[in-house]
Image (cartoon, helix red, strand yellow):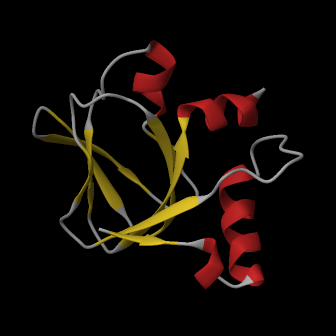
Amino acid sequence: MSSVSLSTTSGHDWAIVYGLCARYTRVESSPDIRLRRFAAGEVIISEGEPSSEVLCLIDGLAEVRSREVTVGEVGPSEFFGEIGFLLNQNRTAAVIAKKACTVQIIDNTEFVEIIK
């Protein structure tokens, strides 16, 4: 897993990232954007771990597994990890990169501000 800082991301790329993951919200200020890259097969979130962040897939494809059974996929501009946060529970499923992925990480406090 590698982190991508906005200082290494061009302004145009930042606008794309912000647009993809914030387009469904009414955000008037720029959120703290953290990006991470995952290789194919790498675990993005694990079932049962604490839900301290909500995530948005920027590019790539990921598989959702619950109890080792594939139950869905996550594609670009889709949020995931929100169920545990909304229910105040640990993660209800694992998400594994099916292809190389770039993911935006939004901590729960920031997510609450975004959806207000």
Can residue 2 be seen at all in this image of the molecule? yes
Query: Quadrant where the N terminus lies?
Result: bottom left
The extreme left residue here reads 68
- Above or below — where is 61 with respect to 78? below
Measuring 68% from the left and 79% from the top, which residue is drawn there?
13
Measuring 65% from the left and 54% from the top, which residue is drawn there?
21
Question: Which residue is more in the foreground, 95 or 114?
Answer: 114
Q: How many labels does the image show?
A: 0
Which of the 4 quarters of the picture holds residue 14? Answer: bottom right
Measuring 61% from the left and 31% from the top, which residue is drawn there?
109
Residue 3, position in %: x, y? 42, 69
Side (left or right) of 108 relative to 47? right
- Above or below — where is 71 with respect to 98? above
Question: Which residue is more in the foreground, 72 or 15?
Answer: 15
Which of the 4 quarters of the picture holds residue 72? Answer: top left
Question: Which residue is more in the foreground, 96 or 85?
Answer: 85
- Above or below — where is 103 with respect to 16? above
The extreme front residue here reads 7
Side (left or right) of 93 relative to 114? left
Can residue 60 be seen at all in this image of the molecule? no
Query: Quadrant where the C terminus lies?
Result: top right
- Above or below — where is 114 with respect to 116? below
Residue 40, position in %: x, y? 23, 72
The extreme right residue here reads 28
Measuring 30% from the left and 72% from the top, which residue is drawn there?
99
Residue 35, position in %: x, y? 50, 64
Side (left or right) of 61 relative to 71? right
